[in-house]
């Protein structure tokens, strides 16, 4: 397959639907969220979703998109969250409570530490990685559709992140809860936030008859979609 053909590679419809299910938690607009979750969007460039992604994550061109994807993959909000969790975990219960009580009111850093304190023992080891990974998937798909990323590279990257998600969480419920905590952490201290819309959207994803997550077992088998390793040709010495 030529490089040009690889770059134009189309994603398998079943895999595309699964990746959409994983990223649909990001679609938390009050009125259109569930509609967009059911009816997979195919033209991000021509909808308000592109603007929403750009406004929140500054992904307005190829360079910015690739930088943001690298940040989500390597650090994201989970790196900060885990640092706070490590500090708080080192304190005994009494000192932890005293420390939280001493935090400055109205400060973003303090607000984020309070969220870590509230949820640190309710999350698995992966913490809020679900938030980073879900946004990675939706931005990666948008980047491929806007020609910011080669399609073949985008598919491979999304597959890798989907496998990370399956290893990090044990169920749709755990994954969606971790995303909600990550969203709270990300928007802590902001004058406007999407926490209520996110909670309502997650409830609909969990209970809605036509929710995309109801189409897949949590451990959806990704093996058939993983590219086979290319075998390099070995020169023959039998001449």
Image: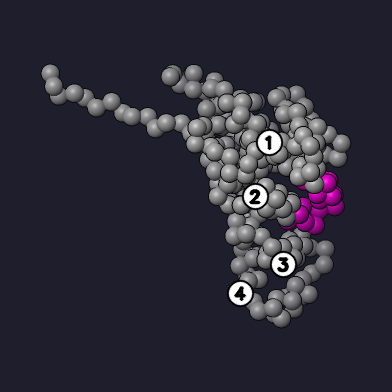
- Mark nearest the camera among 1 and 3 is 1
Between the C-alphas of marks 1 and 3, the distance is: 34 Å
The answer to whether the residues at label 2 and label 4 have Cβ atoms under 8 Å apart is no
Q: Is residue 176 visible?
A: yes
Q: Which residue is mark 2?
A: 171
Whether residue 23 sits left or right of residue 27 in the image: it is: left
Point out the tag, 1 or 4, that comes first from the N-terminus: 4
Q: Which residue is mark 4?
A: 90
User: Where does the image place residue 186, in percent across and percent down from the top left?
Assistant: 73, 52
Taking the magenta stretch, the answer to whether it contains residue 197 is: yes
| Quarter of the picture holding the C terminus | top left
Whether residue 126 sits left or right of residue 118 in the image: it is: left
Q: Which range of residues does the magenta coloring cover?
A: 184-202
Q: Is residue 148 visible?
A: no
Point out the tag, 2 or 4, that comes first from the N-terminus: 4
Q: Secondary structure at mark 4?
A: loop
Between the C-alphas of marks 1 and 4, the distance is: 41 Å
Q: Secondary structure at mark 1?
A: helix
Point out the tag, 2 or 1, that comes first from the N-terminus: 2
- Tell which residue pokes out farthest to the left in this image: 239
Q: Which residue is mark 1?
A: 215
The answer to whether the residues at label 2 and label 1 have Cβ atoms under 8 Å apart is no
| Quarter of the picture holding the N terminus | top left
């Amino acid at each position: 397959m030529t490089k040009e053909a690889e770059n134009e590679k189309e994603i398998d419809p079943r895999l595309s639907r699964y990746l959409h299910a994983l990223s649909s938690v990001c679609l938390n607009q009050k009125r259109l969220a569930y509609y967009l979750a059911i009816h997979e969007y195919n033209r991000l460039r021509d909808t308000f979703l592109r603007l929403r992604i750009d406004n929140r994550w500054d992904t307005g061109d190829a360079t910015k998109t690739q930088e943001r994807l690298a940040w989500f993959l390597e650090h994201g909000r989970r790196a900060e969250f885990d640092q706070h969790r490590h500090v708080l975990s080192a304190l005994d219960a009494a000192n932890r409570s005293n420390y939280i009580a001493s935090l400055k009111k109205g400060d973003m850093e303090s607000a984020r530490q309070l969220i870590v304190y509230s949820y640190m023992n309710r999350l698995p080891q992966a913490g809020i990685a679900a938030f980073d990974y879900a946004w990675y998937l939706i931005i990666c798909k948008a980047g491929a559709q806007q020609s910011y990323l080669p399609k073949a590279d985008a598919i491979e990257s999304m597959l890798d992140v989907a496998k990370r998600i399956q290893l990090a969480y044990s169920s749709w419920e755990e994954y969606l809860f971790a995303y909600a905590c990550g969203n709270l952490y990300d928007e802590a201290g902001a004058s406007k936030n999407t926490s209520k819309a996110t909670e309502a959207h997650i409830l609909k994803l969990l209970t809605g008859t036509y929710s995309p997550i109801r189409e897949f077992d949590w451990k959806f088998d990704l093996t058939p979609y993983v590219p086979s390793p290319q075998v390099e040709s070995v020169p023959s010495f039998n001449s």
